[in-house]
Image (tube, rainbow, N blue to C red):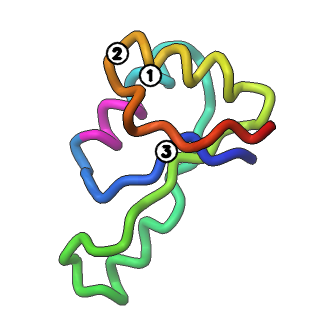
Amino acid sequence: MAELLRTTDIVLLSYVNSLLSDAGIPLLVADVHVSVVEGSIGVFPRRVLIAAEDWEESAAILKDAGLEAHLAASPE
């Protein structure tokens, strides 16, 4: 698994989920249950994880959507 992005913005997470799902790229949003510990105040970022071999294609999709600033560093 490779980290594609990290954010506290749940709207961005939903948008990224939609973009990648439409492209047939499976993803995992990690750290969702940390909100139980933090009291749902949105302090801890959630991570979008994908298969390492899907990173380049996923990054290209997000760049095309204008989300390049949110990308994590390439896993290479």
Dot 3 amino acid type: Leu
The answer to whether 9 appears left or right of 71 in the picture is left
Q: Earlier in the sequence, mark 3 or mark 2?
A: 3
Give above or below for 27 relative to 1: above
Q: Nearer the viewer, residue 5 or 28?
A: 5
Question: In 3D space, how far apart are the residues under numbered discs 3 and 1 (Cα atoms)?
Answer: 10 Å
- Residue range in magenta is 12-17
Question: In 3D space, how far apart are the residues under numbered discs 3 and 2 (Cα atoms)?
Answer: 14 Å
Check if mark 3's residue and mark 1's residue have beta carbons within 8 Å. Answer: yes
Q: Quadrant of the C terminus?
A: top right
User: Residue 44, position in %: x, y?
Assistant: 36, 73
Residue at 77% of width from left, 36% of height from top?
52
Q: Which residue is mark 2?
A: 65
Tell me where residue 41 sits by quadrant.
Answer: bottom left
Check if mark 2's residue and mark 1's residue have beta carbons within 8 Å. Answer: yes
Q: Which residue is mark 1?
A: 62
Residue 5's disc number: 3
Q: Find numbered disc 1 in the image and state the secondary structure of the residue it sits on.
A: helix
Label 2 Cα neighbours within 10 Å, binned few <14 / some 14-19 / many ≥20: few
Label 3 Cα neighbours within 10 Å, binned few <14 / some 14-19 / many ≥20: many
Question: In 3D space, how far apart are the residues under numbered discs 2 and 1 (Cα atoms)?
Answer: 5 Å
Answer whether residue 16 is magenta in the image.
yes
The answer to whether 34 appears left or right of 26 in the picture is left
The answer to whether 12 appears left or right of 5 in the picture is left
Dot 2 amino acid type: Ala
Q: Earlier in the sequence, mark 3 or mark 1?
A: 3
Q: Nearer the viewer, residue 6 or 69?
A: 69
Q: Find numbered disc 3 in the image and state the secondary structure of the residue it sits on.
A: strand
Residue at 30% of width from left, 86% of height from top?
38
